[in-house]
Image: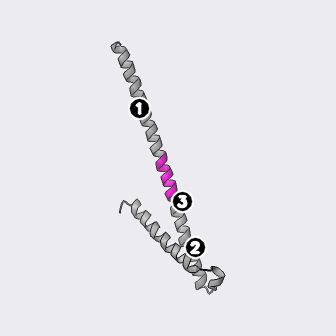
């Protein structure tokens, strides 16, 4: 092989290497986007759990009979307590604290 042919091959290898690096960057970006979307959905769901319990508490405070609201309101308390804890932990992780 001539020196010129070797240089062309080297350039092709460099181009392919750059393309592969670009594809890896795209994949990682897509993973980050998906992760962010999932975390946002999880946080939204957790907040909904907290809001549901707060709505039940408001109805009880306003004098509505517990039996008319839910069979086991204590279950909603447990779900809300768990949601608050997990939401707090996610926010802690997002802030870089562990």
Write the start and end of the magenta stretch as one range. 30-39
Question: Which comes before the other along the chain, label 3 or label 2?
Answer: 3
Q: In the rendering, which numbered label is found on residue 41?
A: 3
Question: What residue is at 42 percent from the left and 66 percent from the top?
Answer: 89
**In this image, 62 relative to 4: left or right?**
right
The quadrant of the image that shows the C terminus is bottom left
Work out which residue is located at the far right of the displayed protein and give it: 68
The answer for how far apart the CA atoms under marks 1 and 2 are is 51 Å
Which x, y percent locates residue 78? 51, 75
* Secondary structure character of the magenta stretch overall: helix
Give the residue at mark 1. 18
Element under disc 1:
helix
Q: How is the image coloured?
A: one colour
Is residue 16 a member of the stretch shown in magenta? Answer: no
Q: Residue at 43% across / 29% down in the picture?
A: 16
Does 29 appear above or below 57? Answer: above
Q: Earlier in the sequence, mark 1 or mark 3?
A: 1
Q: Which residue is mark 2?
A: 52
């Amino acid at each position: 092989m001539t020196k010129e042919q070797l240089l062309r091959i080297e350039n092709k290898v460099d181009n392919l290497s750059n393309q592969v690096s670009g594809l890896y960057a795209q994949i990682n970006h897509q993973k980050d986007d998906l992760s962010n979307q999932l975390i946002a959905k999880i946080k939204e769901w957790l907040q909904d759990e907290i809001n549901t319990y707060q709505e039940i508490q408001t109805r009880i405070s306003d004098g509505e009979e517990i039996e008319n609201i839910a069979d086991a309101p204590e279950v909603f308390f447990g779900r809300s307590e768990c949601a608050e804890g997990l939401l707090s932990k996610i926010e802690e992780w997002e802030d870089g604290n562990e």
